[in-house]
Image (cartoon, rainbow, N blue to C red):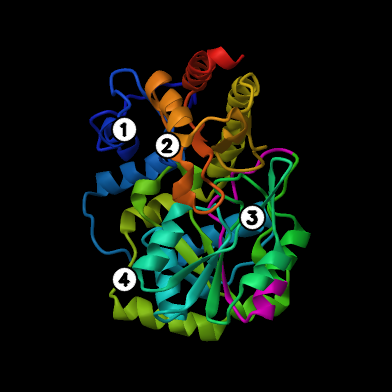
Amino acid sequence: MSFDEIIDRFGTHSVKWDMMEQIYGVPADDGIAMWVADMDFRPPQCVADAIAKMQAQGIYGYYGDETAYNEAICWWMKTRHGWEVDPASVFTTHGLVNGTGMCVDSFTKPGDGVVLTTPVYHAFARVIASAGREVVECPLALNEGRYEMDFAAWDAQMQGHETMFILCSPHNPGGRVWTREELQGVADFCKRHDLILVSDEIHHDLVYPGHTHIPMTNVDESILDRLVMMTATTKTFNIAGSHSGNVIIPDPALRAKFATRMAALGLSPNSFGLFMAEAAYSPDGAAWVDDLITYLDGNRKILDAAIADIPGVASMPLEATYLSWVDFTDTGMSRAEFTKRVEQDARIAVNHGPTFGKGGENFLRFNIATPQARVEEAASRLRAAFADMQ
């Protein structure tokens, strides 16, 4: 396939494109959607073939016997990440926002504090607050344009009612790939404060050359009794609409708690998502991901070059994900002014920084997972929208 293919997604019930004008006021006729975290690329052919096989069989019944599905997950994690997964530890949820909600429901109680390192993926806070738990925002330190853990400050924030820490690894929206030392620091922090650690690693396949993602399970065996891993095919292969994700729990006691809540809520997997995931976690899927990373690497360089041309604007170095986190602080502009220039003048729909929590106030998030021609057009529009500053 060609990642350069322009696919018209209007009128397909695409949140990213069909809701752009309603939510952001960016005109549908010539706007560029760079907000919702899905890609404008077709998934690999192996995924399309799996759906075609379902269609040819013609009956969309209940899915049974997850042996091949679990084997595909285990093969992928071992081959791509050096992580040995026990098939018995795998739970399939309706995506990882649902997985997050299930973890909060299973391992905390109303009034408990749940720690987030902000700015971070906005759905975490929404789920926590909706469940009647307290969002405890522990801001990341911004050091020379790069996020770092600030454990001393976070230790001072703890009040004793916190019971869970949700880690985003790699980090969304900052694009950081956490080092082994940083991950060990998270493990130690959770042990110090007796926290369940939920590690959302949905972006773990989308890592750029020069960086290596380390699964939290491979960092410190002494935390396996408090660790919950979350992974999915959905970001990697652009199949978010399948709403499938995996919550992988090494510890039998935590596993039993989670299984009880799954049973109480009557949750079972979506067969479409399982067929797609099994097909994606394959050598063909791996080759497609390798090509995708090369393509995205080119796109990030195009956007970074445009941002570098605008005084006072800086894009955070992107180590992973296809989400560029852009800082407008040094423009001296108000948030309303720089957002207007991007959305109304450049006609680009982007995510607003404050939705990601403390520290995001002067940022916008740009999705670069779109054909290169669109990224080049967006870069040209941004230069024009801030031309008076150059």
Residue 279 in sight from this viewpoint = no
Mark sitting earlier along the chain (1/3): 1
Mark sitting earlier along the chain (1/2): 1
Tag 4 secondary structure: loop
Q: Are marks 2 and 3 in contact (CB under 8 Å)?
A: no
Numbered badge on residue 140 = 3
Q: Which residue is mark 2?
A: 35
Q: Nearer the viewer, residue 172 or 228?
A: 172
Mark sitting earlier along the chain (4/3): 3
Q: Nearer the viewer, residue 318 or 348?
A: 348
Q: Which residue is mark 1?
A: 20
Q: Which residue is mark 4?
A: 267
Asked whether residue 199 is drawn in magenta, I would say yes
Q: In 3D space, how far apart are the residues under numbered discs 4 and 2 (Cα atoms)?
A: 30 Å
Q: Which residues are magenta?
A: 188-209
Vertical comparison of 209 with 276: above or below: above
Residue 104 shown left or right of residue 15 in the figure: right
Q: Nearer the viewer, mark 1 or mark 3?
A: 3
